[in-house]
Image: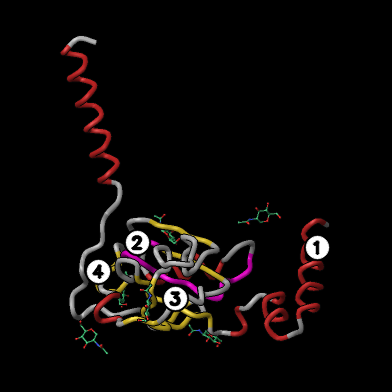
């Protein structure tokens, strides 16, 4: 490779890296006036909770492990909308927003995730709305599905009935999906 083409190659590589880096808008610390969205899509704000990826015993698993989405226009409402649509129509019990732009959903919250000081840890503005709080670094603005009518039928049976009933409901769902 000539010195000329090597220089061209390096410049192209640097440009590619810069372009990739620019595609993620890192969050900024929210103004003191920013607030967590109180409720939407059947969810209610539950507080600031710690992310579990780095915890001993978590095996790298997230506090909310079922679904995720991230982008530079994230707001609390768009995350709640995403989690309420859920996996094949099964509304997720929990939704959480982290790092200003990351949305996580789970039927369960990891037992390792606990409430932490929101003022100290859930401090980032949403990438898509600077007047709203969207978690922090390894900290989730957590939302809990409190509107019972939004629970899928299978989910509410599993919660309210003995284990065999949940299994029966699951088998019925699988059979229904196959048919
Ligand atoms: C960003 O993610 C949220 C949550 O998944 C979604 O509702 C929204 O449509 C996404 N925005 C874009 C521009 O993809
Ligand atoms: C939804 O169900 C379909 C059909 O059973 C399956 O192929 C697909 O992977 C499911 N989607 C998710 C996100 O699990
Ligand atoms: C998560 O937060 C709880 C409550 O503050 C704390 O007791 C626990 O040590 C935290 N976990 C880790 C691994 O930081
Ligand atoms: C939470 O954090 C804020 C800011 O660091 C601090 O002023 C406040 O005392 C903390 N609250 C508790 C209960 O520790
Ligand atoms: C931004 O967040 C604030 C506070 O939650 C809310 O009042 C406002 O409607 C939001 N704006 C948009 C465009 O989502
Ligand atoms: C979420 O709501 C359920 C049902 O009301 C409740 O049992 C659970 O403790 C709540 N979880 C959190 C983290 O607040």
Q: Is residue 73 magenta?
A: no
Q: CA distance from mark 2 to mark 1?
A: 36 Å
Q: Which residue corresponds to mark 3? A: 113
Q: Which residues are magenta?
A: 89-102
Q: Is the shortest distance between ligand 5 and the CB of mark 4 under 8 Å?
A: yes
Which disc, if any, is residue 130? 4
Marks 3,1: beta carbons within 8 A: no
**Is label 1 in a helix, a strand or a loop?**
helix
Q: Is residue 165 above or below residue 66?
A: below
Q: Is residue 18 above or below residue 65?
A: above
Which disc, if any, is residue 101? 2
Q: Is the shortest distance between ligand 3 and the CB of mark 3 under 8 Å?
A: yes
Marks 1,4: beta carbons within 8 A: no
Marks 3,2: beta carbons within 8 A: no
Image quarter for residue 139? Answer: bottom left
Query: Horizontal and vertical percent for residue 5?
Result: 21, 14
Callout 2: 10 Å neighbours few (<14), some, many (20+)?
A: many
- Residue occupying the point 47% across, 69% down: 63
**Comparing marks 3 and 2, which lies closer to the viewer?**
3
């Amino acid at each position: 490779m000539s010195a000329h083409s090597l220089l061209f190659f390096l410049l192209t590589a640097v440009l590619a890296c810069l372009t990739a880096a620019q595609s993620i808008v890192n969050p900024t610390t929210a103004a003191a006036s920013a607030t967590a969205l109180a409720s939407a899509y059947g969810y209610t704000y539950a507080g600031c909770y710690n992310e579990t990826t780095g915890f001993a015993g978590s095996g790298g698993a997230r506090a909310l492990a079922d679904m995720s989405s991230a982008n530079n226009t994230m707001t609390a409402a768009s995350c709640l909308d995403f989690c309420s649509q859920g996996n094949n129509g099964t509304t997720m019990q929990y939704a959480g927003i982290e790092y200003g732009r990351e949305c996580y959903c789970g039927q369960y919250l990891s037992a390792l995730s606990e409430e932490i000081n929101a003022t100290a840890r859930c401090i980032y503005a949403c990438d898509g709305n600077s007047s709203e709080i969207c978690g922090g670094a390894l900290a989730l603005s957590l939302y809990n599905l409190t509107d019972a009518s939004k629970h899928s039928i299978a989910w509410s049976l599993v919660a309210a009935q003995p284990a065999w009933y949940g299994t029966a409901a699951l088998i019925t769902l699988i059979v229904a999906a196959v048919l």
